[in-house]
Image (cartoon, grey):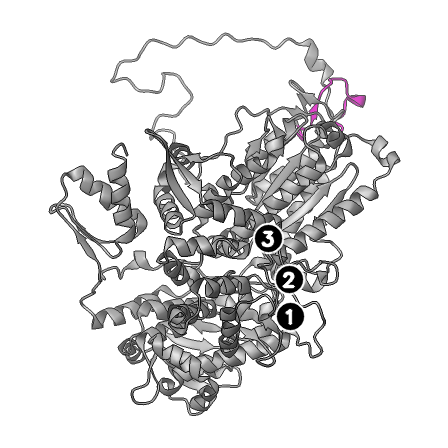
Amino acid sequence: MSASTTQALEYLEQLPGATHKRLYQQPSTALAVFRCMLPHLAKTIVMAMLYMTGPFPVHDLDAWIRTDAKAEKEKAISVLESLNIMAVIQESPKNFSYRLSSGFANSLKQALTGGGNHRSFGVPCSTPDKNKVDIAFLDQFARKQWEAILYYMVGSTSGLRDSEVLGQSVGNGTRQLLRMGEFVSVLHGVKITKTGFTFLLQEVNAQVWSLLIVYLKQAPGLGMNEVDVLSFLFMLGSLELGQDYSTANLTATQLQMLEDLNDFGIVYRRSKESSRFYPTRLATTLTSDAGALQNATTDFDNALRSSRAGRGYIIIETNYRIYAYTSSLLQIAVLSLFAKLSTRFPNLVSGKLTKDSIQKAIGHGIEARQIIDYLSAHAHPQMQKNNPVLPPTVMDQIRLWEYEGERIDTTNGYLMKDFNNDSEYRDLVNYAESLGVLTWKSDAKRLLFVDRIEQISQYLTNKKKRPDQ
Amino acid sequence: MNAIDATDRHIKSTDGPPPSLLAIILDTNPHAWAHLSSILPLSKAVASLLVFINAHLASGNANEVAVIASHSQRTHWLYPTPTLPTPHSTSTSNGHDANGTVPENANKYRPFAVIETAILSNLTTLLNSTTASSLSATSTTQISGALSTALSYISKSHIRHSPVDPTINDHSTITTPDTDGILGQQRVSLTSRILILSVSGDLANQYIPVMNAIFAAQRQRIPIDILKLAGDTVLLQQACDATGGIYMAPESPQGLLQYLMMGFLPDATARRALVLPSAGSVDFRAACFCHRKVVDIGYVCSVCLSIFCIPSLPDSKCLTCDSHLSLSTTLTVTPALIPRKKKKRKRGPGESATPAGSSTPAPGSGTPTHS
């Protein structure tokens, strides 16, 4: 599971079980959920259980997974249960077993064997297109659309002269969407928000998902069917770049979506009446590794080369000097959010990270972590040979500059108190810790603070049901 | 909040496990499969294998697969098809190359379809090209060749995946002799393993090349997993043991798919969290260099460590290194058996551990000093 799909997973988890059930009817959805939403160990467990004849007894699973990997196991099982992929069933008073949801298992089997007649992996056009477009054109189109969105967001803040003009081509629907997702505020002209900055510094794959999730959330309000929207997105992720697909099998909701997705640059249609559409690279990489995708702002041609090489462009030295091999206005605009740029050459921008520039960025709501993540994600291949990628002194200093400004950190969450005895308290602390939701605890007072409660309460109910564990 | 110190320096990678390359060696020895056909026909085994490959590809978005058939007299690439100039795993390049041949099917995930078509057509080619004369020539399989092919493909993929673009500084990366040191320093960008689906026995006649391949795999930390459906176990079990792979010899080969899914699907990342099946007792016997026989007790050349099963070598010379080695003389002499000295009774607590009169120098006295 990569970072880019974490938010998609969070969205999926909060959907009701009935929605999950309907989603899993499509093999393409089941496969996409398996491929990109599950933690690694969960995939192993699902695959081991997929062709098992009976349910998997709980203690057999415990015996299979090493004791020192308990945290990963808890995480895997809690994700599987919250997505309604796997459930605990009681076979006899003492025996509990895991069982895959039959809908998911059947769909995944169909996806693996290619059987059935569900036509969920996209229906290619049978007739050749008169005006066929090639992959280079699609990349060009996707980049133009997506960069326009980013320009629109970053435009006013970066202070670059020609950036506002570039953002003008963004459609009204997209602008509204950006406002709804609180990426920009339009009180006095377009101004980027803290969420917007987070969005901007993400990898392009994560950006696409962020935008799509905002889209998903407002879909029911527009009379669109959530399941249709989601399964269409997952289907897009399994399509082939450069192939034209027919719109004949799509539902009304999905046809409506095509228009919006065309605006984002995720699919390409020549006209609104066209009976065929082309997925772009933004679509085909929706459910695949973010690493395999070239950042939309760098040259798309590079994406065709081998996966990891040649994607970074930034070099940072231990004296805080920064050299960025780029001529893209957008990248320069992003860099100028937190670096003091001084010189620009045809293919190179150079500047410096200063206390002022970093603290200005932090004032805008960017976090030090985001800056470091961005820098290391886009580090030049020569820098990527180092471990850690960035010079440690630079990373520490960026954090220290941020730390200067904030002495208090707030987390919303839930306080758990009044435990009956110490073992009950310890058990819950350990569970919360393994889920990664534990924020604070006090052993003396038997108090703990968690930032998410759903899985904890589920755990407590389960525990009540089986006192032996 | 207070975590700004040296320990927090490493960026937590949220990227998930590194992509995993699985090289599958399918033993297509016709004799062995004919023998097995009543229990598990080849077609069924291949079908199970295809599902397994799809499951592997689904487990990680950048996962890759390579399939090699180890036939009776040669090895044959099943996937990627060798005529491709650059066998990339990305769906784009596959799509380009196979656009004409892969039928469009809305019921199948396209990357799966591409691989399946390639494997099946290559396997058909291989089976059609097998003649009766080539069958009668040998009854075993070219496992050593397949292993070396897999190893070279893996190391090529490693170079392709390294963070530095291989096209920029081709020479320094490829021609560096000691790859071990380099790989250790680089961040792990690709984990690889080899799975051998073996049905043939009688592999002792390839003892030397197979052992060399095993050592190469051991050095590059590539586990070799073995799924042994039939035949004897000597050599391959050692391969697993030396490289840290999984060895399984299922009693009921009909359940091949479940064995594959549960035992062999977890990659290196997942294996760290799992209790792995153990091989039990490993047969460490070696095969001799003169007749390729598995021996319990053999003779070893004192210079080059070659193993021989008979003492009478021609000209009393080692077959490998040509040094003088008269093994027959050793036979006549019965090895003298020196009875072990009984240990003295327990020493008192204050006594020195060094027995008196031993050659170990006392501390301080025998330290050589530089004048």
Q: Vertically, is A401 above or below B289?
A: below
Question: What residue would you read off at disc 2?
Answer: B171
The answer to the question of whether label 1 and label 2 lie on touching residues, with beta carbons closer than 8 A, is no
Nearest to the eye among marks 1 and 3: give it: 1
Residue B64's tag is: 3
Secondary element type, mark 2? helix
Please determine if labels 1 and 2 lie on a single subunit.
no
Distance (Cα) linking label 1 and label 2: 41 Å
Question: What residue would you read off at disc 1?
Answer: A244
Secondary element type, mark 1? loop
Residue drawn at point x = 61 percent, y = 80 percent: A270
Residue drawn at point x = 66 percent, y = 34 percent: B198
Secondary element type, mark 3? strand
Left or right: where A195 falls relative to B117: left
Residues in magenta?
B303-320
Nearest to the eye among marks 1 and 2: give it: 1
Left or right: where A259 falls relative to B289: left
Please determine if labels 2 and 3 lie on a single subunit.
yes
* Image quadrant where residue B243 sits: top right
**Is residue B313 rendered magenta in the image?**
yes
The residue carrying pointer 1 sits among few (fewer than 14), some (14 to 19) or many (20 or more) residues within 10 Å by Cα, namely many
The residue carrying pointer 2 sits among few (fewer than 14), some (14 to 19) or many (20 or more) residues within 10 Å by Cα, namely few
Any part of residue A142 in sight: yes
Give the amino acid at mark 3.
Glu
Q: Residue A405, percent across and down?
A: 21, 73
